[in-house]
């Protein structure tokens, strides 16, 4: 007989309902949303078990708002007077911690105070005020807040005056000079309180007297008005006072003629013509005259006869040549004088020494020196010859040419001395020789025609400017047949 002792165990099945804020931890698992959750496990009896959670997750409230107010704002029973971000913490109806946020702008009314000082009246906010006092102006500013401006106003008054003046001739008043009576000038300047102070000038102007006396006397004059004695031409005055208390001026214009001696100088070059008489030497003439005013006058006329300078020059050479076209001319005239150098009719210079240059084509250079002192002048002229020493040699000739100049070979020139010419063939044979510059070569040797070709010549000669030293000229001439 068997006996069974049986124990039946049961699974566990628990169900719970929970409410939490934001999240809930159950069996080490965190839940953040509402729902039904299960948990499987083996219980202590080693049976498969399941627990069930009916979870409700509630959340905190987070509201945000923006508000603008004037001066202050009450929010959640709290009054705020400055702009800022404020928070309100509380537990909502779900029992969760909640926070509301307000972005608050506190605007303020405008309260400006200004002090003004004006003359007679002042316009403020389109209102005209004529008396001193404190005034207010209420308005809503640009932020929409009630505002009040305050004006502390002082009204000052203008002043007016009349200035009566009597003066002589002219009166200077505030940068202007008046020369006649007038009641029109007005001057305005700030008074003690900064307002216009207007002064009108009432001017009565009297004038000074001027008396002019013109007198003429011989040697001396006594003026009865002043008792003074004068011996020279001039002017004087005496200052008196007239009935208005202004100056009364008496002026003397005096001409005093004297018995004088006049020295007159008359200069001439070589002679002096005076009153139709010719004088050849220095002479002094004296005349006793009387002026139209009856005063004596002695005139001495000094006739001075000056001797003219003699123009003279020296030259650095007595002629010019094609190789020496310049010379130096020097003024050697005695005594003080001025000078002008003329070359071929043209003024060149005024220096004591000058350098003159002739043209290559000129035959002579005409030089004139003109000198003058204070009274006289003189000239001297020199013509300087230009020697032409050019030697010209043709480079081709044709014995059968129509003209003799082209059918013969010779040298040409002027002022050529000690002339000698030798002509050689290309082989060095002398075919012509002469000491006469006018002698011609006809292109033959011993009466026989020389062959066509180039021939070499050598020429030796002197000129006046070479000072006896021979000059050389070498070249070739082409003989054409």
Image: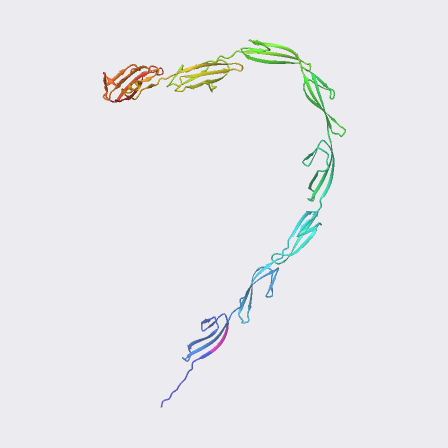
Q: Residue at x 72, y 40 (%)?
A: 199
User: Residue 196: which quarter of the image?
Assistant: top right
> Residue 91: percent from the left, percent from the top?
55, 69
Decide whether residue 86 is among the magenta residues.
Answer: no
Classify residue 263 as left or right of residue 7: right
Classify residue 363 as left or right of residue 425: right
Depth order, front residue of 345/268: 345
Q: Kindly report the secondary structure that dominates the magenta region of the rendered protein.
A: strand
How many numbered marks are there? Answer: 0
| Colour style of the rendered protein structure | rainbow
Residue positioned most to the bottom: 1
Residue 198 visible in rendering: yes
Decide whether residue 16 is among the magenta residues.
Answer: yes
User: Residue 365: which quarter of the image?
Assistant: top left
Magenta stretch, residue numbers: 15-19
Classify residue 135 as left or right of residue 451: right
Depth order, front residue of 258/73: 258
Q: Residue at x 43, y 19 (%)?
A: 355
> Residue 248: percent from the left, percent from the top?
73, 27
Query: The C terminus is located in which quarter?
Result: top left
Q: Residue at x 45, y 77 (%)?
A: 51
Residue positioned most to the right: 243
Classify residue 177 as left or right of residue 447: right
Residue 43 visible in rendering: no
Q: Is residue 301 above or below residue 52?
A: above
Query: The N terminus is located in which quarter?
Result: bottom left
> Residue 382: percent from the left, percent from the top?
44, 14
Q: Residue at x 49, y 76 (%)?
A: 17
């Amino acid at each position: 007989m068997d006996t069974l002792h049986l124990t039946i165990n049961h699974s566990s099945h628990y169900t719970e309902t929970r409410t939490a804020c934001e999240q809930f931890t159950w069996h080490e698992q965190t839940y953040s949303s509402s729902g039904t959750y299960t948990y499987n496990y083996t219980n202590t009896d080693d049976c498969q078990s399941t627990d069930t959670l009916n979870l409700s997750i509630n959340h905190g409230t987070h509201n945000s708002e923006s508000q603008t107010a004037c001066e202050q704002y009450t929010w959640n029973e709290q009054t705020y007077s400055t702009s800022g971000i404020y928070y309100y913490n509380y537990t909502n109806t779900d029992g969760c911690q909640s926070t509301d946020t307000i972005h608050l702008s506190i605007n303020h009314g405008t309260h400006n105070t200004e002090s003004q000082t004006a003359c007679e009246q002042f316009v403020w906010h389109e209102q005209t005020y004529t008396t001193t006092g404190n005034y207010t102006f209420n308005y809503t500013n640009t932020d929409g807040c009630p505002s009040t401006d305050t004006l502390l106003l002082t009204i000052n008054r203008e002043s007016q005056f009349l200035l009566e003046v009597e003066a002589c001739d002219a009166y200077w008043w505030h940068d202007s000079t008046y020369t006649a009576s007038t009641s029109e000038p007005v001057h305005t300047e700030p008074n003690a309180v900064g307002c216009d102070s207007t002064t009108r000038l009432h001017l009565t102007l009297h004038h000074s007297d001027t008396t002019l006396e013109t007198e003429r006397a011989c040697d001396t004059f006594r003026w009865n008005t002043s008792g003074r004695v004068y011996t020279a031409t001039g002017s004087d005055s005496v200052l008196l006072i007239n009935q208005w208390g202004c100056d009364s001026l008496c002026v003397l214009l005096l001409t005093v003629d004297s018995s004088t001696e006049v020295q007159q100088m008359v200069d001439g070059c070589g002679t002096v013509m005076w009153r139709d008489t010719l004088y050849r030497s220095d002479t002094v003439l004296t005349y006793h005259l009387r002026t139209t005013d009856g005063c004596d006058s002695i005139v001495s006329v000094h006739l001075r006869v000056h001797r003219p300078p003699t123009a003279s020059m020296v030259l650095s050479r007595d002629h010019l040549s094609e190789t020496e076209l310049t010379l130096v001319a020097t003024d050697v005239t005695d005594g003080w004088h001025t000078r002008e150098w003329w070359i071929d009719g043209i003024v060149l210079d005024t220096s004591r020494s000058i350098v003159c240059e002739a043209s290559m084509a000129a035959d002579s250079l005409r030089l004139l020196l003109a000198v003058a002192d204070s009274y006289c002048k003189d000239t001297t002229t020199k013509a300087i010859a230009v020697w032409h020493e050019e030697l010209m040699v043709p480079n081709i000739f044709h014995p059968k040419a129509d003209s003799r100049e082209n059918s013969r070979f010779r040298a040409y020139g002027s002022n050529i001395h000690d002339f000698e010419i030798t002509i050689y063939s290309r082989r060095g044979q002398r075919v012509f020789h002469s000491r006469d510059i006018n002698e011609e070569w006809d292109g033959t040797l011993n009466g026989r025609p020389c062959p066509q070709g180039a021939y070499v010549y050598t020429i030796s000669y002197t000129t006046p400017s070479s000072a006896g030293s021979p000059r050389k000229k070498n070249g070739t001439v082409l003989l054409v047949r």
